[in-house]
Amino acid sequence: MTTAMIDAAASADGATGITTPRPFADVARENLDRLYGYCVHLCGDQTDAEDLLQETLIKAMRAYDGLRDPEATKTWLFKVATNCARDRWRARGRELDTVPLDAGDADDDFSLFATIAIEDPFPYSDELHLDFLRLFEDEDVQAVFATMTPAFRAPVLLTTIHGFSCKGAAAILEIPLGTLLSRLHRGRKQLERGLWEYAVSRRLVTASEET
Amino acid sequence: MIDCVEAVRRMWSYLGASLEPDPTVELEEHLEVCKRCCGELEFSRHVRDLAATSSEPPIRDEFRDRVTKLLAAGHDRGAAR
């Protein structure tokens, strides 16, 4: 093993104790774009997202104490952002984590996989399901995200776009793992239904009246 | 053995490698005998990828400059301590 490899291995493993705490500015810059994207989703608006990100960075900067594990630092930054968002929502008389009693219930039986097969929007396609997904540009997916219940959207975003494990996402949202898994499933179902309804409403596909 | 409803329920956490060992084994046993759920799992993988790779709006240059200054000021204060 070369010296460079040993250095790389040491810096990747906080448990060795060899690493030194990284400056907050480096950690923040490294996570800035992802954190901003998360803030946009939490706020639903770019101006609010900028305010939220700034507040997050100021709070995190004050509390930062040289966390050595990069993954733990990332989780912690997202947690700070979530808590800041929660406070902002509360100040406006809303709750970030509220789960409407009927939310998601109607989506639970919905299967996008089955719907596409039944509706058959591309009769001559060999890749029916993939062709459906190919209809969606980034802005279309973002528009569908925006229609989702925030409490169900956050687990989907954290575990897909931001690459957190379910356990990590549960820690960020400060909910038990079982609750996270349930909300992830409901979020997934909302996303699937949202994709179908978006495609129908934009006339990207035609659907029978039943769906 | 778990049914299709339960199998579908477990798929996203399975794809995210977040499913516990026992539920994973149960799901994989179901997949061995259920062709429909294999299709659903493959499709779920693509839906998940679509969500994961969708780009978010970029940070405005002006705001990025503001953040850079904020971080630099914080760094200087930290160094002065």
Image (cartoon, coloured by chain):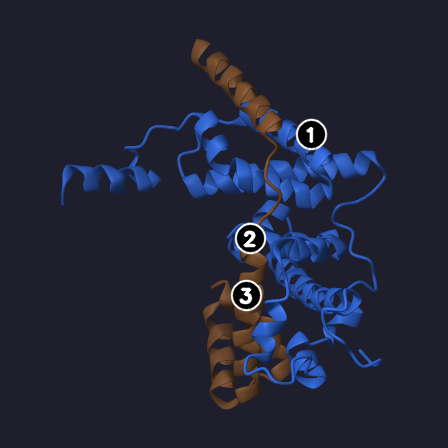
Chain colours: A blue, B brown
Q: Distance between the residues labelled 3 and 1?
A: 32 Å
Q: Which chain carries label 3?
A: B
Which residue is nearer to you in this view: A130 or A35? A130
Q: Distance between the residues labelled 2 and 1?
A: 22 Å
Reading the chain from its start, which is encountered first: label 2 or label 1?
1
Q: From the viewer's perspective, is residue A190 above or below residue A120?
A: above
Residue identified by numbered label 2: A161
Q: Looking at the rendering, in which quadrant would you find the N terminus of chain B? A: bottom right
Say the numbered circle drawn on residue B40: none
Query: Residue placed farthest to the bottom in the image?
Result: B33
Residue identified by numbered label 1: A51
Which residue is nearer to you in this view: A19 or A206? A206
Residue A176 lies, in percent from the top left, at: 62, 55
The residue under the point 34% across, 28% down is A20
Q: Which of marks 2 and 3 is in front?
A: 2
Kind of residue sitting beneath label 2: Ile
Secondary structure beneath dot 2 equals loop
The residue under the point 73% across, 34% down is A48
Residue B54 visible in the snapshot: yes
Q: Cβ–Cβ below 8 Å for labels 2 and 3?
A: no
Q: Which chain carries label 2?
A: A
Q: Cβ–Cβ below 8 Å for labels 2 and 1?
A: no
Residue B54 lies, in percent from the top left, at: 58, 54
The residue under the point 64% across, 78% down is A113
Residue A160 visible in the snapshot: no
Residue identified by numbered label 3: B13
Q: Cβ–Cβ below 8 Å for labels 3 and 1?
A: no
Callout 1 crowding tier (Cα within 10 Å): few <14, some 14–19, many ≥20: some
Callout 2 crowding tier (Cα within 10 Å): few <14, some 14–19, many ≥20: many
Residue B14 lies, in percent from the top left, at: 51, 68
Kind of residue sitting beneath label 3: Ser
Secondary structure beneath dot 1 equals helix
